[in-house]
Amino acid sequence: MRRVLLLFMMVAGISLVLWSGWHNLRERRRAMQMQQEARVTLIPDTSNTAADSPAAQSPLRGKPAPAFTLMDLAGKKVSLSDFKGHPLVVNFWGTYCAPCKLEMPWLEEFSHKYAADGFEVVGVTYDAEVGKDTISKDAQKLGVTYPILLSDPKAEKDYLSDSEVLPMSFYVDKTGKVIEVTAGLGPKDDLEAMVKETIAAGANR
Amino acid sequence: MRRALASFALFASLAGAGANPALAQLGSMDAPAKAKSYVLYAAEQQSVPAGKRGVLELRFHLVQGYHVNSHTPKSDLLIPTALTLQPADGVKAGPLEYPAGQPFSFSFDPTDKLDVYAGDFTIKLPVVATAGAHTVDGALRYQACDHASCYPPRTLPVQVVFTAK
């Protein structure tokens, strides 16, 4: 009886070892598979006009631009209402964002070129936590003279929702309506065309 | 009979425990499934000679379509990719060796050349360690962009697992 029991235990033991080895292998394969799948889902949009891009998904297009009151670099409060009656670009940027820094001198150029049409630009710094000194230095280096404001959580929630993509621009016509939203850097000509559209929109109202 | 059953139970629990270290090792890998990770790292078991200088290779993978600044970006306004490591008992770590970056420019301004990592990159960690298993915890700070947009800086937890023999 004892021998039979021992034999049974040995068989059971060996089976258990084999099972645990197989189980390990299966778990490892599953983890590798999960990793592969995760990589596939993380591939970004290849176009800033893609249907699922933050710009295309923005619920603000066609809606009144959300009100904001934010500090500028001199500590002065600046509100959306200060630009009432002006075609405006609200441009979210960050000090770490290289494409933003390519775009900002273009916005500066257009702010002068279309000044006679009342066109204005306001920059909102997403990484306000880096401090005014760093932001001022960046703005100076880029030759930006339009107002640079420090973002806050409310403005980010109202304008960007959950998106963290920079640059992100909101084209607001003189009636205060958002007529276009862009995420990422596009060609300079496209940007100028949108500025012109923003000026033209609401012109006869 | 009772003794036989008890030893069977002990054997079963040991066999079960045998399965666990492998699962624990899997658990120590950084989960790549987080929606907003742009750089992936998986702990690889490595070995170095005990008491002698050895070099560990930490392999990172960038999600397709993204790049990060190299450790030495061309502008001091950009955030460099940097690994920081916590001190670990029995491990003396030398200065990290970062790979050279590759030139990159956004299509709208081909004259502005950035220095970036894309695809896979490896950071080398020279160590002198006492015999045995070691774990060094650390974090990789990076800031990712794609062809037209940038994303906020992120910190990726890194666990270096190795044995000195």
Image: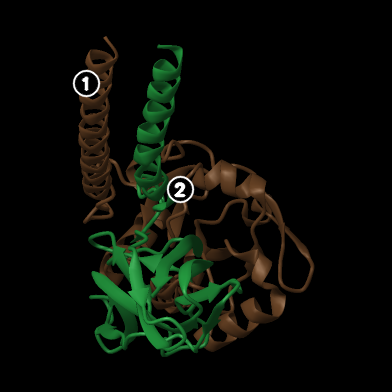
Chain colours: A brown, B green
* Residue B30 at x, y percent in the picture: 41, 53
Three-letter amino acid code of the residue under disc 1: Leu
Res. A133 image quadrant: bottom right
Check residue A163 in the rendering and tell me which mark sits there, or answer none. 2
Taking A104 as reference, is B66 above or below it?
above
Specify whether A21 is left or right of A147: left
Res. A99 image quadrant: bottom left
Res. B91 image quadrant: bottom right
Residue B58 in sight in this render: no
User: Split into 4 quadrants, where in the image is the N terminus of chain A?
Assistant: top left
Mark 1 secondary-structure assignment: helix
What residue do we see at 29% from left, 14% from top? A2
Check residue A106 in the rendering and tell me which mark sits there, or answer none. none
Say which of marks 1 and 2 sits in front. 1
The subunit carrying tag 1 is: A
Residue A83 in sight in this render: yes
Judging by the rendered image, the residue that carries numbered circle 1 is A7
* Residue B161 at x, y percent in the picture: 42, 64
